[in-house]
Amino acid sequence: MGKTKTATFSRRWDKLKKSWYKFSKNPLSIVGASIVIFVVCLTIFAPFIAPYPEHAGSFVNFNEASMAPSGKHLFGTDVFGRDILSRIIFGYRLSLIMGVVVISIAAPIGISLGLIAGYMKGTWVDTVIMRLTDIFVAVPPLVLALAVCSILTPSVFNAMMAVTLMWWPWYCRMVYGIASSIRNEFFVQAAEVTGSGKPHIIFREILPNCFGPIFTKISLDMGWVILIGAALSFVGLGAQPPTPDLGTMVAEGGRYMPDQWWIAVFPAIAIMFVVFGFNILGDGIRDMLEVEEV
Amino acid sequence: MVEKLLDIRDLHVQFDVYGGTLKVLNGVNLCMEEGEKVGLVGETGCGKTTTAKSILRILPEPPARIPKGEIFFKNQDILKMGSRDIRRIHAHEISMIFQDPTASLNPVFTIGDQLMEAIKYSSIEDGISKREIQRRAIQSLQDVALPDPERILENYPIQLSGGMRQRICIAMALATRSRLLIADEPTTSLDVTIQDQVLRLLGILVQEKETSTILITHSLGIVREWTKRVYVMYAGAMVETARTEELFEKPLHPYTQGLLKAVPKLTGEGIAKGIPGRIPNYLNPPSGCRFNPRCPHVMPVCKIERPPFFTTEGIHQVACFLYKE
Amino acid sequence: MMAVETLRVTNLKKYFFTKQGVVKAADGVNFSIWEQETLGLVGESGSGKSTVAYTIMGIYAPTQGTILFKGKDISKESKKRSKRFKKDIQIVFQDPGSSLNPRRSIKQILELPLRVHRITNGSRTDQIEQLLNMVELPSDYMYKYPLAIGGGERQIVAIARALATNPSFIVLDEPTSALDVSVQAKIINLLMSLQEELNLTYLFITHDLSLMRNLATRVAIMYLGKICEIAPTVEFFKNPLHPYTRMLLSSIPVVSKDEEELKPKKIISRGEIPSPVNIPPGCSFHLRCPEKMDICTRADPMMIEYAQGHFVRCHLYPIETG
């Protein structure tokens, strides 16, 4: 029994090593992963890393307002005298949380619906699910989010719900395409012919074959959700002051361009930085999950 | 001495992958003269397609590497050529038919588009007129016995059957008037009766146009019916070569013998056991003769040294120490 | 002792209704398979041989006709069949690349039928080890993934999967067509010894007549959805009657002079295989038939028994003879 335990462990270790090899073939993937890990650490340890954590709340110090980047404030201060670097670090929190919440709700819903519709392709189930998807896809995403947010009170939570609402259809469509072609493969027929139940076929036979595109999309989506969240708060429908939010910071800072450029530019770069990281990471994940023949 | 059209000498090809280097081709030797119909027979993974792609320099380098060897085509080493010369070779000298006609034809362009493009880029004369290209396209479709060529030019690949698609690939390869045609398993995906038709056609055409041909296949029956001379390949090297008739009457290499025994025969002798073992792992191939772990006549020297070609009779050569004089 | 009829297919029809028209993939197929026999079902693309196999398996429901398995009617889709039939009838698919889920380990793949049919004699790992032993694969293969092993070995795993439920009847859909000849030899030998050991009955679908010469007890040839000729193996090859059979036999590339002599006179096959949507009237083969007569363009021939057990469907052999 001990022998099998070590055997299992060494097999899993080998699998890990091989996945790392595939992932790290493109050095950019490591850059992407580093960026993401770095940002995640920032958000987790924000109170300890940010030089002026109290500036992330309702803090005001007009003596130090609109100061250019310096040794004391690496990214300068805004019109209220708040340290921009600290606010960016706390702003990342909001962005990442939004990404995680939206995707962890939208993805499972979209994926499940896509799998079911793809497996039952040609039946009424397929038609109902995909037409429902079509309806949601037809609405321009930002418009839908704007509509939802303006009807309800503007808040981070409502922004997240709005974005989730128009996010799941894309997962559904992507998985539908893959599932409907895989459902005709011989291994699915083999499972059916043996008498296996539908849930097993959908979630244990078909779903694993969708992992590659799914995880790549999740990674890319993190970037997108962050951007859309920033866009929503840019127009005032997301986080409300004084909560530090990257989009809001860019919006407010825009007024002071080009003289106090740092108020808008650094948050904007921060957004680009994290989105870039997720995009490159997505490429690496896709490489890692590729199933290859020997 | 007749000048050799193609002379591959001691070709080594390796691929860098996870876990090390795949030493696929291990000293391939092959030569042919103008006008010959040569067969290259071997099982999956033996390196036949790698050899073909090396001749055309279409291996992805990296991960492929060619550490050693020469490929002389009309006395010029292809491996030392620059990309401009290689393009010239593709356009005018060597063409290839691939195994899967569906994958070789672009599904979003019509047959006419693809065929005429091939003709245009291979025309030696500059300023060939569009009408002339079209005429040649129709002619080449007629050459492969496709009915109603004008309509086929308008069709998309998906509208045609597998046999027709493969014949179009043959038409494309031959329309370019190359000196050397490499046909890699051209009929594997076709039905037996269509396969027969297509091979027959190919035979007539290469004779008419005096194109030298290398037919790559894993089917011994096809090689026997279609070629005059044949190479048997195993695990990255040639193990036997002879006139086709002679190879089938007197197979010498233990691998060739095993292969022939494994083919089910119409005479109903039952099915032989096959060759024990598997093809070697190219990451860590056996030393000496790569067939030695599976050989019923293995001797100690086989595990140490790689056997060179020994000539037994005329052009019949075997890479096996059993035949060392 | 009377032979037990394992499978009887009567007037089996499977039509597919598409935008281009009705595809009569199988159009009135009749045959029986007896216990421990191997029936070879031979044909080219469009012949309907795979359709027949899949209808027998229940992947399709028949448009018309009946399928009797050991006397019981199973002429419906597999999801409507009772579980014991799914246990007793198994299939090995054609393409080793896609008949095993590339994302599941071999252990998981072999476990599925055991789990579905609740077969428990010993731990799962032991059962799977036993299955792998039966097909002469090493036990540690259960932890590998399909793409890490060769095509031949994948097919052997597919065979092990079919054996997991201890079936009595296995449909083999071109199991070795994509494989090299030496790997094929190994698998065919395995199938033959398993047949003897476990008293299996096989329906073997293929286009390879040379293989059937050595493996099948009876051979049936299909063309465009109908059986042209069916006979015991030796008789089939000694005395091929149908022009299509002769055309097929004369096109096979063989490897020895002895075999050349056994082939019928070379019939140059002309023309394309018509698509099953555009089946010509009369005998479906008449467009390519070298012996075409006037009646062939008008009337579809009936199957007659030319000699003991040797059936043929061709106007060359009208009902009065034989």
Image (cartoon, coloured by chain):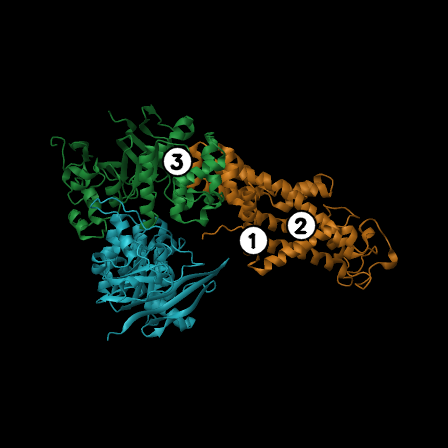
Q: Residue at x 63, y 42 (%)?
A: A104
Q: In the rendered image of this protein, which colour is used for chain C? A: green
Are discs 3 and 2 located on one and the same chain? no
Q: Is residue B265 visible?
A: yes
The residue wearing badge 1 is: A17
Kindly indicate the quadrant of the structure image that contains residue A69: bottom right
Looking at this rendering, what residue extends furthest in the right direction?
A63
Chain letter for mark 2: A
Label 2: element kind: helix
User: Identity of the amino acid at label 3?
Assistant: Leu
The residue wearing badge 3 is: C163
| Location of residue C21 in the rendering, given as x and y in whole percent from the top left corner | 33, 38
Kindly indicate the quadrant of the structure image that contains residue C58: top left
Q: Is residue B19 above or below residue A225?
A: below
Q: In the rendered image of this protein, which colour is used for chain A? A: orange
Q: In the rendered image of this protein, which colour is used for chain B? A: cyan
Looking at this rendering, what residue extends furthest in the front direction?
B300
User: Identity of the amino acid at label 1?
Assistant: Lys
| Image quadrant where one finds the N terminus of chain B | bottom left
Chain letter for mark 3: C
Q: Residue at x 21, y 67 (%)?
A: B314
Dot label at residue A270: none
**Distance from Cα at disc 3 to Cα at disc 2:** 52 Å
| Location of residue A195 in the rendering, given as x and y in whole percent from the top left corner | 44, 31
| Image quadrant where one finds the C terminus of chain B | bottom left
Q: Is residue A160 left or right of residue B120?
A: right
The one of C119 and C89 positioned closer to us in this rendering: C119
Dot label at residue A226: 2
Label 3: element kind: helix
